[in-house]
Image (cartoon, helix red, strand yellow):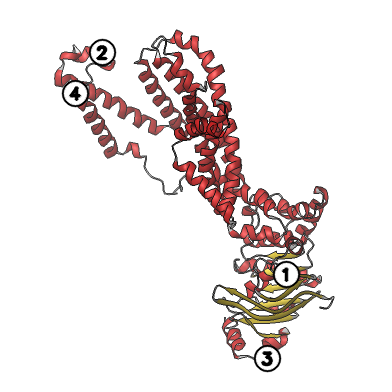
Amino acid sequence: MLYPDTVEAEILVHKPWFVATMFGVVLLLFMAFNMSGTSFAELMRPVIGEPSVSGLYGRFAIAFAIAVIFTLNVVLIGFAPLKFQIGIVWLELLLLFIAFFETFHLSLPFIREKLPFLISQGVVTTLYVSAISIVIASVIAVAGAVAKLSNNGFAFAIASFYTSFFRGLPLLMQVYLIYLGLPQLGFVINAVPAGILALSLCYGAYMTEIFRSGIQSIDRGQWEASRSMGFGFALTMRRIILPQALPVIIPPTGNQFISMLKDSSLVSVIGVWELMFLARTLGQKTFQHMEMLISAAMIYWMLSICLELIQSRIERHYHRSKVR
Amino acid sequence: MSAQSVIEAKAVSKWYGQFHALKDINLTVHKGERIVICGPSGSGKSTLIRCFNRLEAHQQGDIVVNGVALHGKMTNVAAVRSNVGMVFQQFNLFPHMTVLMNCMAGPMWVKGVSEKEARETALKFLERVRIPEQANKFPIQLSGGQQQRVAIARSLCMQPAVMLFDEPTSALDPEMVSEVLETMTGLARDGMTMVCVTHEMGFARAVADRVIFMDAGQIVEEGTPDEFFSRPRHDRTKLFLSQILKH
């Protein structure tokens, strides 16, 4: 939450100047596009006649109708309590998206036929590749952060070289380097382990920086109190510093997890049968690319939503000790 | 070194870069003794007591705490620290743990005491600082004075041989100062060995066996409260006392 000022303000979307401006902007915006070919124009046929010959009047009427609907919608939502506002706006945006996908005329039977395989093979692979990578990346991140904060020259040098290298190279290149480069050294590595290794190393590097900043955000006094009671370094880190750093670490780490979930699609280039790979290949034979790609997109989104929910759960848990 | 001395500092010097923070400090704290260290800010008093549990390292001279010398490369620093309680100006309670857990953590994790026993000890000392009813709250839900008393209880749970207080009342509202000072006075009366850096002259007068005045990294004057407040010998001490007792 932002800082809640106790001064009661008028609701913005009910101020006449705001409503008028909003109406004007929407009207001009839709005037600028020629909407006469859309299904909305079809709905307007009783008013404007044949849409394609309605000319400037038709354009204006369509834009005007949209502006009225939009403005009325916003003003009405302004009356609802916060929770409802959030729900309604989510729902409306979702409907707009579905309407957008409608325009592709997707073949639902085809999706229904391929979906089970997309999930049982693709989603499962995506999930376990990401999950293992997340765990390894977190372990690397803690070790890397400690190394970067230590005054041991070797540890610092290795950690900073590592973060610099893996943050500096495109992930796609890292995937290739590991899958095609390691065999040069004599390690023949399968596609899945190579993908996991690349993802772990890359995200471990980003998360090292997140963990480092989280650890640094904890007041020196906590270290002093802990050490002055005779706690060793590891104990202080594990029981005192990290638990306090987690609320700082978790939001950006949640970001990284979501990002990793989607970047796991990059390992499709080395032939791992994960979600993205299947989405591209399943539709190829029958040229039904869009069906599979949109399905995969929706699945990625739903998985991300799950991660978002987990993140907000954890954040709420750590909020406990901050409530007066 | 006599068996009675808990802390013994001999010719201690410390530098921060070029800055000479402690200059040839000699100080012995005997068992059961209450020592108050005062002086203007930047005089090195906090630095000195932070050297006593090795939160800071000294570069010259010897510090012996409970018979263990705090030298350059010490391997048993944790053992020394667990025997020396420290109370900070900013309390430094662990905000993610309840008050009770703050008090139980030390005995459980350092001394390997069972949870049940640690809980009993914690409750006993929370009782002693008169806030047993706050045991299950988080530190942020307590007032400053209560937090500082929890911090004192947390240190006491480790059953230390000596307690170091680093300006324990400086961050408190005037009303809360007295509740913390009362707790400290109670401790002193029970015979705890204490070294307090404080500006509370009333406390020094009532409780201290010796008052030490520091300026510019040196011990300028040392004496019983009576001598110190009634017949200060050095001009610097007189100036300091006139400043601090003016209001």
* Residue count near mark 3 (Cα–Cα under 10 Å), binned few <14, some 14–19, many ≥20: few
Residue B70's label in the rendered image is 1
Give me the chain letter of mark 4: A
The reply to whether label 4 and label 3 mark residues of one chain is no
First in sequence: mark 2 or mark 4? 2
Mark 4 residue element: helix
Instruction: State how far apart marks 1 and 3 are (Cα).
Output: 35 Å
Residue that numbered label 2 is attached to: A42
Q: Given the image, on which type of amino acid does mark 1 rest?
A: Leu
Residue A279 seen anywhere in this rendered image of the structure: yes
Q: Residues within 10 Å of mark 4 (few under 14, many from 20)?
A: many
The part of the image, by quadrant, that contains residue B48 is bottom right
Q: Which residue is more in the foreground, A206 or A178?
A: A178
**Which callout, 1 or 3, points at the residue further toward the start of the chain?**
1
Identify the residue under disc 3. Answer: B231
Give the alpha-carbon distance from disc 4 to disc 3, as whole Å. Answer: 96 Å
Answer above or below: position of A116 versus A20.
above
Instruction: Rate crowding at label 2 as few (under 14), some (14 to 19) or many (20 or more) other CA atoms within 10 Å.
Output: some
Res A324 visible: no
Return the x and y of residue A247 as percentages of the image width and height. Answer: 57, 45
Q: CA distance from mark 2 to mark 1?
A: 88 Å
Residue at which label 4 appears:
A60
At 28% from the left edge and 15% from the top edge, which residue is drawn?
A39
Q: Secondary structure at mark 2?
A: helix
The mark found on residue A65 in the picture is: none
Residues at marks 2 and 1 on the same chain: no
Disc 3 marks a residue whose amino acid type is Arg
Residue B165 position within the rendered picture, expressed as x and y whole percent measured from the top left? 68, 69
The subunit carrying tag 1 is: B
| Residue positioned 60% across, 36% down in the render | A135
Q: Chain of mark 3?
A: B
